[in-house]
Amino acid sequence: MSALTQSDTWKKYVEYNCLPKQHFDFNEIEDPLDVEDEELKIESEHKNRSESQIIKEASSLANGITVTLDLFSAGIESAISGEEREKHRLSDYEKSELTNAWALVLAEKNVQLSPTALLVVTMACIFVPKYMNAFKIRKERKLQKLQDNKVLELETEIKTLNKKLKDARAGESSKV
């Protein structure tokens, strides 16, 4: 062995065996088995939810879905018919029946929906019909403007024809 190699070996020996070791906290390391245990714990908590909790959550979600559908359908119907949105809202009886039906399905299937997703869908259901109404109003205004321009053209033409008629009658009376 060369002297350089022996020196390198000696340095490694001193570094590993003689210098103070850095403290290493094993608690900072995330054990993959712990993560899996946590996921299993969460799953078992969902399975162990009481039936009353499931029904309560399903009822709340069903109410949100019913309100969203009511807003959306009333908005679309209003945009199509041109009538006020309130004329197309669900009756209290219809809302109650629809909410109960949704609650039964959601509880049976144990469906959970993110509140954020419900918010996004509700916002879309509110604002899409408003935009449809805005486009409809814009289209009606353009049509009204075209009709107003046509009326002005026709009025101008009538005035011109009346003037020609008046001039023609004046010319006939001067000849007689």
Image (cartoon, rainbow, N blue to C red):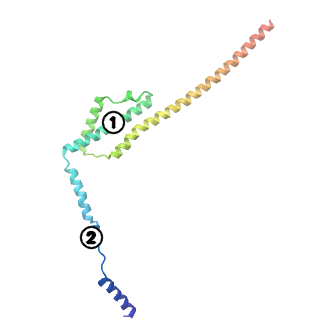
**In what element is the residue under mark 2?**
helix
Query: What label sits on residue 111 in the rendered view?
Result: none
Residue that badge 2 annotates:
26
Residue in view at x 78 percent, y 11 percent = 171
Percent across and percent down for residue 43 are 23, 54
Residue under the point 21% across and 50% down: 47
- Mark 1 is surrounded, within 10 Å at the Cα level, by few (under 14), some (14 to 19) or many (20 or more) other residues, namely some
Give the quarter of the image for residue 91.
top left
How far from the left and from the top, in percent, is residue 98?
A: 29, 34
Q: Is residue 81 left or right of residue 60?
A: right
Quarter of the picture containing the N terminus is: bottom left
Q: Residue lying furthest top in this view? A: 176
Viewer-proximal residue, 58 or 19? 19
Q: Does label 1 or label 2 sit earlier along the sequence?
A: 2
Q: Which mark is residue 67?
A: 1
Percent position of residue 70, x then y? 35, 34
In the rendered structure, which amino acid carries the disc numbered 2?
Answer: Phe
Which of the two residues, 8 or 130, is positioned nearer the viewer here? 8
Mark 1 vs mark 2, foreground winner is 2
Q: Residue furthest front?
A: 20
> Which of 21/115 is in front?
21
Q: Amino acid at mark 1?
A: Val
Q: Establish if 158 lies above or below 73.
A: above
In the rendered view, tell whether residue 97 sits above or below residue 56. Answer: above
Closest to the observer, 77 or 2: 2
Residue 17: x and y, percent? 29, 84
Q: Residue furthest right?
A: 175
Q: Quadrant of residue 147?
A: top right
